[in-house]
Image (cartoon, rainbow, N blue to C red):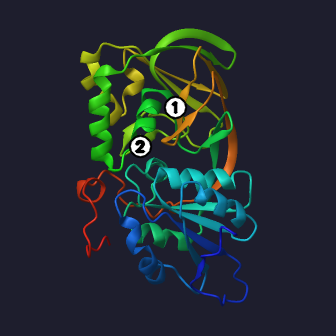
Amino acid sequence: MSALVNVKLFWTVMIPGMKKRVLFLINPVSGIGRQKTIEALIEKEIDEQMLQVEVAYTQYRGHAREISKQAVGKYDVVVAVGGDGTVNEVGSSLIGTDTAMAIIPTGSGNGLARFLEIPLKVNRAVEIINFLNFKKIDTLRMNEYFSLNVAGIGFDAFISHKFADKKKRGPLAYMQLITKEFPHYQSLKYNINIDGKSVSLNAFLISFANSSQYGNNVHIAPGAKIDDGLIDVCVIREFPKYTAPALLISLLDQSLDKGKYDEIKRARRIEITQDKELMGHVDGEPVFLGKKAVIDIQPLSLNVLVPPANYRKNSRLDPFIDLLPSIPGLSLE
């Protein structure tokens, strides 16, 4: 059965000369519920004189990837309506194609959306699609997986595997899990080769950053650029647990690269080996990597829709939107 069988057509007649077809791909269970008002906002905010819009809903993990692959060549833009996992599924399926990705952030972290300054208010994120302002960005490949934002090995990957089994979502649930697991987590020894230079060390985590942040303005690579053809490799070495508050502060105030136990290098290719299976994540989604992980850059391989330079909205952490559950009937405009 085709993955596109449930597509809902909003406008079937296009203005002569207009060619852009836009597919909104909605994850109905992502994040904290902001996706629930999306159809009404599409009808309100999208300029129907410019765009032909269709809507489809994902039904299971991996469904967004299936639909996005089928959309290549049929649509000019696929809009990922969901969290970081949905964005990864959609974007990784469009790498190297002429079909662009747009993001309506309705997840709990929204790392790539924040970095690209896409508004967190859903109606404004929908509105910017009308501008059709495109930007080419790099992507990362880690073994057979792709990352648009941040991939990693170590504690963040360990947490992503644990969090995947949790029913409760959102930043608070994520922080509760970190608080529970951090005291017991042991750094592991890794063999690391960065652009031909090798070292063995005990690391708390090793992150491969395309943008600067995980999400919620927690910055793992403060100087990262998404279109420079380089990966920001952040190594947090084994450190005394009592220094954790300083680490947290550095993640929030974008000073991680100045830490005593932290080092950031820029590279095009990284190899990580270990005696046992490596546990990793791509944009927060858990993956298993075998005993060797190869990470390399895919320069300017994905076209994304971003706000025009003169359209900038606040993307700071808003506790009433980001941390509280969705309230039925509450307008998010």
Name above or below for residue 156 compared with residue 258.
below
Residue 208 visible, this orientation: no
Residue where numbered disc 1 is placed: 152
Q: Count residues near mark 1 (Cα–Cα under 10 Å), then give few for <14, some for 14-19, many for 20+.
A: many
Query: Can residue 96 be spotted in the picture?
Result: yes
Residue displayed at 67% across by 54% down: 93
Q: What SS does tag 1 mark? A: strand
Give the residue drawn at x 47%, y 83%: 43
Q: Nearer the viewer, mark 1 or mark 2?
A: 2
The picture places residue 212, in percent across and down from the top left corner, at: 47, 38
Residue 169 lies left or right of residue 61; in this view the side is: left
Q: Residue at x 51, y 10 (%)?
A: 201
Q: Does label 1 or label 2 sit earlier along the sequence?
A: 1
Write the residue at 30% across / 51% down.
Answer: 317
Q: Amino acid at mark 1?
A: Gly
Task: Tell me if 240 is positioned left or right of 160 in this view.
Answer: left
Residue 77 image offset from top left, x and y in percent: 64, 67
Q: Residues within 10 Å of mark 2 (few under 14, many from 20)?
A: few
Point out the image quarter for the C terminus.
bottom left
Quadrant placement of the N terminus: bottom right
Question: Mark 2 is on which residue type?
Answer: Asp
Disc 1 and disc 2 in contact, CB within 8 angstroms: no
* Residue 174 x %, y %: 33, 42
Q: Which residue is mark 2?
A: 165
Callout 2: helix, strand or loop?
loop
Drawn side of residue 243 relative to residue 267, left or right: left
Can you say whether 102 is above or below 161 in the image?
Answer: below
Q: As displayed, is residue 281 above or below residue 206?
A: below
